Image (cartoon, rainbow, N blue to C red):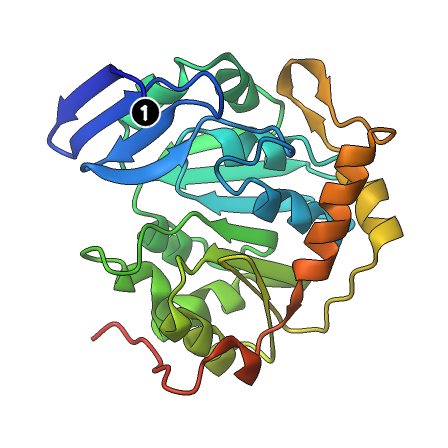
Amino acid sequence: RGPINFVQQSRYGILHTRADALGGDWVYGGNAYDGRVNTDLLVDSNGIQRVYLLAALHPSARNILEIGVGSGSWTAVLAGMPSMDKLTVVAINPGYEELVARYAESEAAMAVPGVELIWSDGRNWLKEQQGAKFDLVVVNTTFHWRAYSTMLLSRDFMELVRAHLADSGIYAFNSTGSHDAFATAQAVFPYVYRFDTFAIAANHELNLDSGTAVRRITQIALPLDKMIDASDPRVLAKIQSMVTGFHRYGATDDSVDAEVITDD
């Protein structure tokens, strides 16, 4: 990994980045990995394919909520979804504003019409939005073993999210490999799916096929006029592998000993 090229210290902790020309800079919060600066589906150094897949699963996500901003790469993909009218990004550490502004594509994503960045505690903010319904809720969860992760992985939080989902809404979060997180989602939602480390939950069955996935994903308009080349065989192969990797979560995922996470 390259040299440290950004450091910020505040009462929220220490943020820093490491340069990497091949896969995008590495981002660290509190000295723990917090993503990379990349929106390229083929590079996929940060598992950005997980966010792209959401466009294939929800054909008309107009009101989107993202909790956690990281490098701003996830925001850039969500902001490029053709159906997006409103994208609310809630992040707890305002120090990320300076970090995001260092990268042209991430900065441009924040300027897309309909995108609003709010510095607040995501859970508390959601509790205050009485009656609000979202078509898509995406939570960029930190590692499940870090302090306070329970606040975004508990049954209590997921029930809060479910109450704010539209009828066709989808909830997606990074389990960071925790089977307990998947078991918790299963305790709240009737339908839970796995894609890579993503848990994708809904009140209805989700279906996915290659043709639909290619059409919807290649319609995403990234900031700075970047588009996905639907004629590139590498893109088609990548999307096919994404469709193959999406499945209903169950016993085959070694969830036998998983426990439901609560606030306690």
- Percent coordinates x, y for residue 51 in the rendering: 59, 44
- Percent coordinates x, y for residue 99 in the rendering: 34, 20
- The answer to which of 123 and 184 lies nearer the viewer is 184
**SS type, badge 1:** loop
Q: Quadrant of the C terminus?
A: bottom left
Q: As shown in the figure, which amino acid type bears the numbered disc 1?
A: Arg
Q: Quadrant of residue 256?
A: bottom left
Tell me what residue is drawn at x 57 percent, y 29 percent: 39
Q: Residues within 10 Å of mark 1 (few under 14, many from 20)?
A: few
Against 44, is 251 above or below?
A: below
Is residue 224 toward the left or the right of residue 95 in the image? right
Tell me what residue is drawn at x 60 percent, y 52 percent: 136
Tell me what residue is drawn at x 40 percent, y 15 percent: 101
- Percent coordinates x, y for residue 146 in the rendering: 22, 55
Q: Quadrant of the N terminus?
A: top left
Is residue 174 toward the left or the right of residue 79 in the image? left
- The answer to which of 24 and 154 lies nearer the viewer is 24
- The answer to which of 237 and 46 lies nearer the viewer is 237
- Percent coordinates x, y for residue 148 in the rendering: 21, 57
| Residue 225 visible from this viewpoint | yes
The image shows a total of numbered marks equal to 1
Against 54, is 190 above or below?
A: below
Q: Which residue is mark 1?
A: 1
| Residue 58 visible from this viewpoint | no
Is residue 8 toward the left or the right of residue 256 in the image? left
Q: Quadrant of residue 204?
A: bottom right
Residue reaching furthest to the left: 11
Is residue 13 toward the left or the right of residue 230 in the image? left
Tell me what residue is drawn at x 71 percent, y 51 percent: 241
Residue reaching furthest to the bottom: 256
